[in-house]
Image: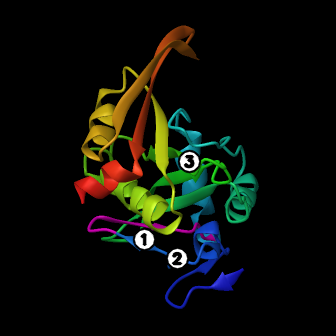
């Protein structure tokens, strides 16, 4: 652990091990390593979430489990999971991650979770995706970032398209939600597409 110069104690994250500066800053949000102070909001965030957004996490069932998850996320080498913090007041509004970073083909799966309806529709998710993609392509030198999203999640599909992702395939009946089979869309973004859009 170390103490951030202007903030709470934070665990050393893979973001920093890759030689980048944390946090990644946008106009509305910052992506930053999770701090122990985030354990309670993280617990609330994950407890009320459907973890189908590509994040490779299980919801902690206790406050202590949430604290342990914060420490574990800082030391999970093939994955990079960062908190999405609102720039106006620093509140944790979600999580964004790149998974399977050890992939020999230089690709990673993107995961995103934005807090409930009160935080959606403000552009937090789109900006977090763009920041994470910039880090993935420019700092981690990835060749491709991909994601999975439910086909009936129209707002997420639009947000990913705005961030530059393209439809790659439809997996019919891939997941079960509420006893019903639902389709899942796979979307991807290549480094050259990212570069061309800049």
Q: Give the secondary structure at mark 2.
A: loop
Which corner quadrant holds the N terminus? bottom right
Q: Residue at x 33, y 35 (%)?
A: 166
Residue 47 rendering spot, x and y as whole percentages:
59, 41
Mark 1 vs mark 2, foreground winner is 2
Q: Give the secondary structure at mark 1.
A: strand
Q: Please state which of residues 13 and 9 is positioned toward the viewer in this rendering.
A: 13
On screen, residue 99 above or below 165: below
Q: Please state which of residues 51 and 197 is positioned toward the viewer in this rendering.
A: 197
Q: Quadrant of residue 162?
A: top left
Circle 1/circle 3 CB separation < 8 Å: no
The segment highlighted magenta reads: 26-35
Circle 1/circle 2 CB separation < 8 Å: yes
On screen, residue 12 above or below 74: below
Label 1: few (<14), some or many (≥20) within 10 Å? Answer: some
Cα gap from disc 1 to disc 3, whole angstroms: 18 Å
Give the numbered dot on residue 108: 3
Residue 152 rendering spot, x and y as whole percentages:
37, 20
User: How did the renderer colour the structure?
Assistant: rainbow
Give the numbered dot on residue 113: none
Label 2: few (<14), some or many (≥20) within 10 Å? Answer: few
Label 3: few (<14), some or many (≥20) within 10 Å? Answer: many
On screen, residue 86 above or below 152: below
Q: Is residue 65 left or right of residue 187?
A: right
> What residue sits right under mark 2 in the picture?
20
Q: Please state which of residues 178 and 109 is positioned toward the viewer in this rendering.
A: 109
Q: Is residue 159 left or right of residue 35?
A: left
Residue 71 rendering spot, x and y as whole percentages:
72, 65
The answer to whether any part of residue 177 appears in the image is: no
């Amino acid at each position: 652990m170390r103490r951030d110069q202007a903030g709470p104690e934070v665990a050393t994250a893979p973001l920093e091990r890759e030689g980048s500066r944390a946090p990644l800053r946008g106009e509305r949000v910052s992506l930053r390593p999770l701090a122990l102070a985030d354990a309670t909001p993280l617990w609330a965030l994950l407890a009320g979430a459907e973890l189908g957004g590509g994040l490779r996490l299980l919801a902690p069932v206790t406050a202590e489990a949430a604290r342990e998850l914060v420490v574990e996320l800082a030391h999970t080498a093939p994955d990079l999971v960062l908190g999405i913090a609102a720039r106006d007041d620093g509140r944790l509004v979600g999580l964004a991650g790149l998974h399977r970073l050890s992939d020999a083909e230089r690709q990673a799966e993107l995961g995103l979770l934005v807090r409930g309806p009160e935080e959606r529709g403000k552009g937090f998710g789109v900006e977090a995706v763009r920041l994470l993609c910039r880090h993935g392509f420019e700092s981690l030198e990835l060749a491709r970032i991909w994601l999975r999203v439910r086909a009936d999640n129209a707002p997420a599909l639009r947000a990913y398209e705005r961030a530059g992702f393209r439809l790659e395939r439809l997996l019919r009946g891939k997941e079960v939600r509420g006893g019903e089979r639902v389709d899942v869309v796979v979307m991807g973004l290549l480094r050259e597409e990212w570069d061309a859009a800049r």
